[in-house]
Image (tube, rainbow, N blue to C red):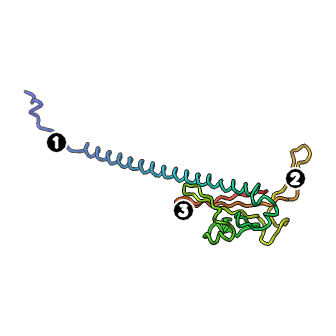
Amino acid sequence: MRKPSPSSRPPLRQRGVVLIFALIALAILMIGAVAVMRSMGSTQFSIGNLGFKRDMANQGERAMVKVQQDFTVGPLASLAAREANLVASNYSATMLPTNAQGLPLALLGSDNDFAAVGDVGNDLATGTGITIRYVIDRLCPPGTTEPDDNCVREADETTQGGGNLSTPKDPVHPTYRLTVRVTGPRRTQSFFQSTFTY
């Protein structure tokens, strides 16, 4: 019997199963590509936010440098000068009222609220849209003067024996609190606090 030639065979029916699987695989690849692109976008956004926050923290250090100058060679260099409020240097001789987080209310309100304890002219501008405002308060209750036992103080330590043990003496140095508000170009605000003795 004679075999039919390949050209004379009837064509096979195409069922389209391979095409369906190819379309499904293509859809899965497209969804994966979109997910990767969105993930990269959110990662870059997070990195940008972290960098922005870090820059605001670094800029806030400028207030500490300014306060150190005021306490060493500036208007707050003497103990007598620190006995009274000095609005021109953003200084309060007593503790300022704070919110539940310990931030002075003067930094949370308007310029008029701040004017009672500090001078808006002392704000530090960085030239990059960041403004730094700060206030210093001595951690003494209102109505107290130096020396007062109700003030928060740092204790001096004296060394005994071979130099390994130290015992605190009477507290002598008053403690000051510096609170800094850094306002970014998009009206974002970061607050930083530190305490120091002088």
**Disc assigned to residue 176:** none
| Residue at mark 1 to residue at mark 2: CA–CA distance | 97 Å
Q: Is residue 12 left or right of residue 151?
A: left
Q: Which residue is mark 1?
A: 13
Residue located at (78% from left, 69% from top):
141
Q: Is residue 116 left or right of residue 46?
A: right
The picture places residue 66, in percent across and down from the top left corner, at 69, 56
Q: Amino acid at mark 3?
A: Arg
The picture places residue 12, in percent across and down from the top left corner, at 16, 39
Residue 169: image quadrant is bottom right
Q: Earlier in the sequence, mark 1 or mark 2?
A: 1
From the viewer's side, name the closer residue of 164 and 59. Answer: 59
Classify mark 2: residues with Cα within 10 Å, few (<14), some (14-19) or many (20+).
few
Q: Earlier in the sequence, mark 3 or mark 1?
A: 1
Q: How many marks?
A: 3
Residue 69: image quadrant is bottom right
Tag in front: 1 or 2: 2
Q: Which residue is mark 2?
A: 167
**Disc assigned to residue 187:** 3
From the viewer's side, name the closer residue of 48 and 33. Answer: 48
Quarter of the C terminus within the rendering? bottom right
Q: Specify whether residue 172 is in view.
A: yes
